[in-house]
Image (spheres, rainbow, N blue to C red):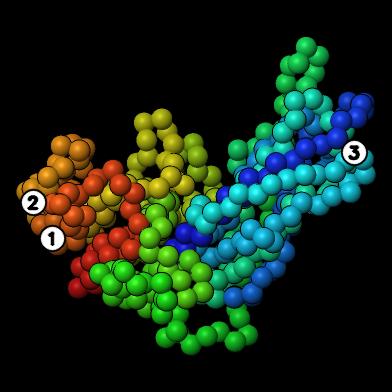
Amino acid sequence: MKIKPTLIILAVFITFLAFSAPAMADDTIVLSTPSIDIKQGQSAELEIEIANVDILAGMNFKLYFDNSAFSVDKSSVKLTDKMEESSLVFSLNASQEKGMVAAIAASWANQQVGWVEKTAVVKMKITADKSAAPKEYPLTFDDILAFKIVENNVFEPYDIKIEPGVITVLPSDDQPPAEDTDKFTDLDGFEWAADSINALAKAGIIKGAAEAEYRPQQNITRAEFCKLIGETFGFNEVDESAVFTDVSNDDWFYAPVMATAKAGIVTGYPEGDFRPVAEISREEAAVILIRSLKAAEVEIPQGEMTFADADEIGDWSVVSIASLVQMGMVNGKGDNKFAPKDNLTRAEAAKIIYSAYEVVQK
């Protein structure tokens, strides 16, 4: 699969009118999405639904989707209203990066929501990329919390049952010619990476973040970089014994993260998390790339650290960066500085990934 960091963070603030009501008989809220079908390059409406809700003081959740295959237009996102005795008021803040819809409903007193049957609370238009692989893509809920207030202002959480659906991408009736899929219109100023970007697009390793757009200036996440590594080096065997506290088997990034874990490329953090949606730094990417080359049995030369900001480079990444410089796969960002803590952009990722791709294809 290919990378498309179409990141959506939609902050939805929901206020419920206050009424008194009896306590619920079943303190389990159901959070779900229906399964939908979308043809390549086309759109469909996706709903987020909740059920078995009556009294609520606050709720939040995140819905993740594969942002390498789909995008959401923030102007299409809306909340349903006129739900019996309650109305919803919201504001939106959207950006294109992490493949996530975040919803927050907050109140500091019990509110009567006024429905018990399953009801759509968020509706949005989701679009499948023209080059999205025809298959099923899972949806994933995370960071879910719902609560009411009992006496003495004590918060009492509800049990939450999740029923995430899947998005099935179907082949388009009129797919564009293959030669047009790697022609991006936003590479001005990134000529140094254009050949790598177009070559990886032809190889099926990367794709644009939108039609005719690659968005080379955007940063790439740790999960997305793992996906690039897996596609380039052929890491596809999942390590089901590995456990990260923030990666579950219904996450879109489960397979690429666990495949790189199986290959010994990533190990996560001491706390047990992987931080898949965190943006990856230049020195983190360097270490992952060297480990991948070693796993592919590529001979790694020793290098010499000559960057002016060498004292800012972590001890754990110095050798990897020096070796990549020696191999001609990475260079500095001006003033002879490597900028190890800077986030890796999509253009930079394409440049170093294509360098590795050329090596492993020999």
Label 2, secondary structure: give it: loop
Image quarter (top left, top right, bottom left or bottom right) of the C terminus: bottom left
Q: Which of disc 3 and disc 2 is earlier in sequence?
A: 3
* Nearer to me, 216 or 101: 216
Q: Is residue 225 above or below residue 150?
A: below
Please identify, in this view, whether the residue under mark 3 or under mark 1 is nearer the observer: 3
Residue under pointer 3: 114
> Callout 2, which amino acid?
Gly
* Other residues around mark 1 within 10 Å, as few (<14) / some (14–19) / many (≥20): some
Please identify, in this view, whether the residue under mark 2 or under mark 3 is nearer the observer: 3
* Nearer to me, 155 or 164: 155
Left or right, residue 234 beside residue 124: left
Left or right, residue 107 beside residue 127: right
> Callout 3, which amino acid?
Gly
Report whether residue 259 is seen. no
Residue under pointer 2: 303
* Other residues around mark 3 within 10 Å, as few (<14) / some (14–19) / many (≥20): many
- Residue 127's image quarter? bottom right
Q: How far apart are labels 3 and 1 at the CA level?
A: 64 Å
Q: How far apart are labels 1 and 2 at the CA level?
A: 8 Å
Q: Which of disc 1 and disc 3 is earlier in sequence?
A: 3
**Residues marked 2 and 3 touching at CB (< 8 Å):** no
